[in-house]
Image: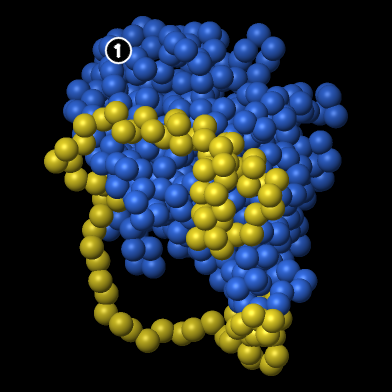
Chain colours: A blue, B yellow
Amino acid sequence: MELDRMSALEIGERLGKREISAEEVVNYFWERTQKLEPELKSFLTTCPEEATGVARQVDELRRRGERLPPLAGIPVAVKDNLSTRGIHTTCGSRFLENYIPPYDAAVIQKLKENYLPVLGKTNMDEFGMGSSTENSAFYPTTNPWDFSKVPGGSSGGSAAAVAARQVPLALGTDTGGSVRQPAAFCGVFGLRPTYGRVSRYGLIAFASSLDQVGPITGTPEDGEALFDLIAGYDERDATSLDAPGDIAEPELDEQRVKEIKVGVIREQEGNGFAPEVVESVKEMASFWESYGAAVEEVSLPLTEYALAAYYLINAAEASSNLGRYDGIQYGYRTGYAADLQELVFKNREEGFGQEVKRRIVLGTYALSSGYYDDYCLKALKTRTLILRDMQRALQTYDFLLGPTTPTPPFGLGEKIEDPLQMYLSDVCTITDPLVGNAAISVPGGFTPEGMPLGLQMSAAPFRESFLFKLARFWQQRKKYLTCASLQCGEKG
Amino acid sequence: MEELYSLVDHLSNLSRIKLSSEEKDLIAGQLKDILGAAQKVQELDTGGVPPTTHVFYQWRTREDVPAESLPVEEVLRNVPERESSLVRVPRIKSLDE
């Protein structure tokens, strides 16, 4: 059986009918992972033994005739900033190279409760800071569609693993686009949930007011199933939303599409936007129009201020969150230090990479006395204005449409020397986190060179289910290939 | 540039990260560009606008309820240097100062 050509839910159905065993499924994907890993390097740690253990449990329960959740037995890869009890969790950093969490993140507990075998921990930009996975302290991940290109970031390992079908499902985290941008670059589906819908307990913090965990999958149905499984209130996360967990919306049919109003974001074209990217947005706009939806241009005039506000806020929050890494109770410890102060200074010097140092320094600046009002506070007030703008737009439109990224995937090494250029690649994805929207990246076709393009649909908080239905309506008709592994196999 | 260099020096001290002089040079140069871009927010009139730190902030407190803790041995497994259940660090102040 060619499991890499099936969705997770299709595999789940076969597991339910006992046409195949969970152990066989895990073995299949573990073998694929090993075969593709030398080129891709999606993983930082793999745990096939633990995964096989869960699979055997699933098989045993099924033999006894127990009914199991729909994704039971389907291997999943999780980003390496999600704490896994007894399994290395490095955050892509030297600082946490040897760190083994004594507890599971809330989302990992949910995976375990639903019997999903975790096949491994995926590569990422250090602490989530980056857009290409090149800021991993260990090695970069490559894009499965072209090994000379980046997979995006910071959840580049998760997106590459799904696009190559090393696993059918993965979890990433999104602070300013870190689920959606790599999903776009790797030609798969990635959701950033509403802030507060998925517990951050056990997610190693980068910018706490923005961080969210989200699914990366090959189909929108798999994405919705995985999202439903991880979402929900958790009292251990003070920002978890105490709201109904299940807000499923009915399936979209051609009748219902006629009632939808789409706003195409005017500011997301022009300077800095590649022509094929702009073209793919137009194609999606005409698609919805052809099914009778009302499609109009909408202006978000503060878009150009959002990137500056975003980088100030994330750096400020990061510098504060990363203050905890002193290397005393856990983490990197230098060889020799004359006293306690020197120990901390040296641990942080040797344990952190360039980008992390840069953001800590920038954040410290924005928070420091004399600059706080002009930078941090100003950015937070700008955030209020952006929020008001967005609320106005979403009163008129059911969702906003734009590209996920301003350009197709760029080359490895192309932007790594120029942090500002790298930051600009997040320009389409930073607004939704600032305002708490739900947003999804869906495949939007390919460049003439065969690289994937991603399109983004953003909706009001709590409308994840609506976004998945839109994605499904689109993909059912477009049938974009979301599995680069077929090509990988040929190239590899 | 020299001003920026000493600013980075100051910030490295505040953020408890030792930076080599090459790193300071590099970060000073990049900080100039990044701060230039971040200046953008200054153009906006934000008079009377409140800051947004969290989009949906629900102030929530809960009762203090004793719960099971992780075993001490498990928690201390990540300590880089220890003596039995104590964390070992160098002296607070170096003797040569």
| Residue beneath the point at 65% across and 54% down | B19
Mark 1 belongs to which amino acid? Glu
**Mark 1 belongs to which subunit?**
A
**Would you identify the image quadrant in which residue A432 lies?**
top left
| Residue beneath the point at 39% across and 67% down | A236
Q: Position of residue B44 (x, y in %)?
A: 26, 30
Quarter of the figure with the C terminus of chain A: top right
Q: Position of residue A253 (x, y in %)?
A: 34, 22
Count the marks: how many? 1
**Would you identify the image quadrant in which residue A53 lies?**
bottom right
| Residue beneath the point at 28% across and 18% down | A299
Q: Is residue A13 visible?
A: no
In the rendered view, does B17 fall on the left or right side of A332?
left
Taking depth in this image into account, of B52 and A182 the one nearest to the observer is B52
Taking depth in this image into account, of A101 and A331 the one nearest to the observer is A331
Q: Position of residue A398 (x, y in %)?
A: 27, 26
Quarter of the figure with the N terminus of chain A: top right
In the rendered view, does A79 fall on the left or right side of B59?
right
Q: Hey, which residue is sitting farthest left in the picture?
A: B48
Mark 1 crowd level (few <14, some 14–19, many ≥20, 10 Å Cα): some
Instruction: Determine whether the residue tagged by mark 1 lies in a helix, strand or loop.
Output: strand
In the rendered view, does B22 fall on the left or right side of A319?
right
Q: Which residue is mark 1?
A: A297
Q: Hey, which residue is sitting farthest bottom in the picture?
A: B84
Taking depth in this image into account, of A46 and A420 the one nearest to the observer is A420
Q: Position of residue B56 (x, y in %)?
A: 26, 50
| Residue beneath the point at 53% across and 8% down | A275
